[in-house]
Amino acid sequence: MSITPPANFNAEDFPNPIKKMLADRKAASDSMPFHIAMIVDGTVIQALHVDERFAAAYLSSPTFVQCKGLSEGGPDAGWSYDSEKGTFTAPTE
């Protein structure tokens, strides 16, 4: 779960380790211009702070599927996906 400090955040209100964590999260959040809430069953489960490219991708209603990791033969960016077969294919050049 992500902890994003509110706009009126004051690090001095928290103990030292928490101050640093919240200050770091606020700085990271402020560096990304797009903020997206991931909602499941009416509840925000993750707040994302992303650049324009990822905001466009997330907000275009993409399909998510479980897959193997790259080291196990799973896909990488640019691969095609056959939804009928449930298979990934590496691009050919």
Image: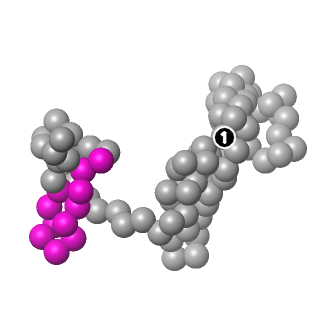
Seen at 56% across and 57% down, the residue is 56
Q: How many marks?
A: 1
x and y, in percent, of residue 29 in the image: 68, 40
Q: Which residues are magenta?
A: 78-88
Residue 74 seen by the camera: no
61 or 43: nearer the eye?
Answer: 61
Look at the image and tell me in which quarter the C terminus lies: top left
In the image, taking residue 93 as reference, residue 45 lies left or right, namely right
x and y, in percent, of residue 30 in the image: 73, 38
In the image, taking residue 68 as reference, residue 29 lies left or right, namely right
Seen at 51% across and 76% down, the residue is 41
Secondary element at image label 1? loop
Q: Quadrant of residue 69?
A: top left
Give amino acid for label 1: Met
Q: Any magenta on residue 84?
A: yes
The residue singled out by tag 1 in the image is 32
Q: Is residue 34 above or below residue 93?
A: below
In the image, taking residue 15 as reference, residue 39 lies left or right, namely left
Q: Any magenta on residue 72?
A: no
The structure's colour scheme is one colour
x and y, in percent, of residue 16 in the image: 72, 23
In the image, taking residue 47 as reference, residue 22 lies left or right, namely right
Seen at 80% across and 31% down, the residue is 11
Q: Quadrant of residue 36?
A: bottom right
